[in-house]
Image (cartoon, rainbow, N blue to C red):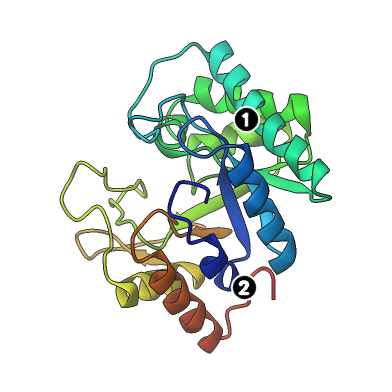
Amino acid sequence: MGEGMENEFRLMPFISSANIACGFHAGDEATMRRIIRLCVQHRVAIGAHPSFPDRPNFGRVNMNLPAGQVKDMVSDQIRLLMRLCQEEGATLRHVKPHGALYNMAAVDLNLANAICAAIIEIDPGLILFGLSGSIMADAARSHGITFYHETFSDRTYRHDGTLTPRSMPDALIINPEQSAEQALNLAQGSGIDAEGKKIFPKADTICLHGDGPDAVAFASSIFSVLRNNKIVIGHE
């Protein structure tokens, strides 16, 4: 959230947690504060969404930065959102890296450790969201950080459990019904890769990107399907 779509108030009834852009790929303090207030109003858990410093590319282009610089930039973003949360009487609950930083940290232990080091320095009680089954889980475990294995309702998977790169065809799910079906399957313990084969990623949390033009339709469809199948959504 906070990535320029201004659809947050419409998404809030359908979600249990929000990842708020912290200014490096999108957003600013005024936007962050507005979304924090919406989260408090709707009892939605608040997460920091730190990114590489790359607004022109929306944080979705790989950057090769030293681990120390990654730690500092992640720390700066978490601290900013935490300060705004404190000023609004809210609590920061988790951290989810954004875009290229997320994908690189899923396979690069040095990056994953840098993110964990930033969390430990600020608040070891913060939960880290990362790609299900990835190296980030190992880094979190070694730092004593709670890790939530994350799956995706609007992205396709390769058979090894990684996401189909956005540069490839069919990386995105563009149909709300298909997205809801994938979310239900993931919540029930399995999924289907881009070739139609079953995969079994662990799903502690399911992501829906808020920057898509049909994000609200996706969220509504997913919410209805999960509830109709007696899947309890976090804030219920």
Please tell me whether residue 159 is drawn above or below residue 100 in the rendered image: below
Separation of marks 1 and 2 at Cα, in angstroms: 28 Å
Q: Position of residue 33 (x, y in %)?
A: 67, 46
**Can you give x and y, in whole percent of width and height, for residue 26 in the image?**
47, 38
Q: Judge left or right: residue 222 versus residue 8.
A: left
Q: Secondary structure at mark 1?
A: helix
Q: Is residue 68 above or below residue 138?
A: above
* Image spot of residue 18 (x, y percent): 59, 55
Q: Is residue 17 left or right of residue 221?
A: right
Of labels 1 and 2, earlier in sequence is 1
Q: Is residue 203 visible?
A: no
Q: Residue flagged by tag 2: what amino acid is it?
A: Ile
Nearer to me, 73 or 37: 37
Q: Are marks 1 and 2 in contact (CB under 8 Å)?
A: no
Q: At numbered mark 2, what does the secondary structure look like: helix, strand or loop? A: loop
The C terminus lies in which quarter of the figure? bottom right
Which image quadrant for residue 21? top right
* Image coordinates for residue 102, horizontal then vertical, percent: 46, 36
Give me the residue at 46% from left, 56% from top.
Answer: 151
Q: Is residue 119 left or right of residue 27?
A: right
Residue for point 76% across, 44% down: 85
Mark 1 is surrounded, within 10 Å at the Cα level, by few (under 14), some (14 to 19) or many (20 or more) other residues, namely some
- Mark 1 vs mark 2: in front: 1
For badge 1, the amino acid type reads Gln
Say which residue appears at 49% left-offset and 46% top-offset.
133
Residue visible at 27% across and 71% down? Answer: 175
Q: Residue furthest front?
A: 30
- Residue indicated by mark 2: 233
Q: Which residue is mark 1?
A: 77
